[in-house]
Image (cartoon, helix red, strand yellow):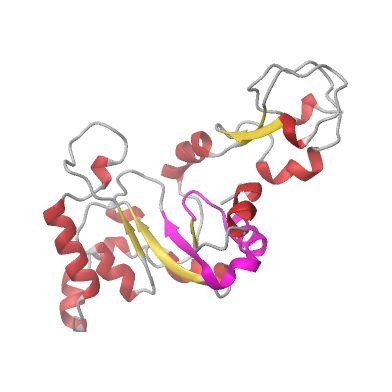
Amino acid sequence: VINRPLLEALAETGRPLIVSTGAAEPDEIENARMWLDPARGRLAFLHCISSYPTPPEDAHLRMIADVRRLADGARVGYSDHTTSVTTGLAARHLGAGLLEKHLTYDTSAAGPDHAASLDPDAMREYVRLATTPIDDAERERLTDERMLGEHDKRVLPRERDVRHVSRQSLTTTGKLPAGHALTKADLTIKRPGTGLAPVTLDRVIGRTLAREIAADTPLTEDDLR
């Protein structure tokens, strides 16, 4: 959501765009919406908690409404990392127009996503509940109240580690000498987010290096004149 060069390049493809708001602050979502304004009619923002799996008390499904406000006319949905088959039903009731849910052959398999995914039988029930008309009394019976949570979108404490490792930095594509004036070809965007954020790319181009920089190094302000 903060990778402006990537978002703008994708917007130019003319294809539909789905942007996750996991581990994102409100101003970051608003910035992304402005960058993607040309794609507004084919754009969706998903409320997401970047925790795998997400405990019920951290789902904060009421934040879907705040993401709708920040999305300013773009479609809104929910990227679901809980383990419940009823979360999609609750998210739909709270305004999610599309749902992302991971499917796995084995929830105990090795890797970061399997534990937050559903096996085929559970996925079948998830889809049935999320797409079948249901009366309010039955919906309330099936809804885990712990998942409703707070209204205001923000980065949760459990997302901060993911935010740190999954964000990206402006990173050198090769070894560069001190005094070199940076060009776009000198830089790429890679994890981790320990250096200058991708949004600073246009402001960094043309600045000179204060020291020699090795290849594949996240740039910091101290590296620049």
Relative to 91, is 103 above or below?
Answer: above
Membership of 41 in magenta stretch: yes
Q: Residue at left 58%, top 54%?
A: 10
Q: Residue at left 78%, top 45%?
A: 202
Looking at the picture, tell me which residue is in the foreground, 36 or 220. Answer: 36
Query: Is 168 left, or right, of 23 in this rendering?
Result: right
Relative to 166, is 143 above or below?
Answer: below
Looking at the picture, tell me which residue is in the foreground, 101 or 14. Answer: 14
Which residue is most to the bottom?
Answer: 135
Looking at the picture, tell me which residue is in the foreground, 4 or 8. Answer: 8
The quarter holding residue 146 reads bottom left
Part of the protein shown in magenta: 21-48
Q: Which percent across, then down, holds residue 138? A: 15, 78
Q: Which percent across, then down, holds residue 180? A: 85, 23
Q: Which percent across, then down, holds residue 102? A: 29, 51
Looking at the picture, tell me which residue is in the foreground, 189 or 200. Answer: 189
Q: Residue at left 30%, top 61%?
A: 147
Q: Residue at left 69%, top 16%?
A: 214
Query: Is 138 left, or right, of 101 in this rendering?
Result: left
Q: Quadrant of the C terminus?
A: top right
Query: Is 104 left, or right, of 221 in this rendering?
Result: left
The quarter holding residue 151 reads bottom left
Q: Which percent across, then down, holds residue 82? A: 28, 53
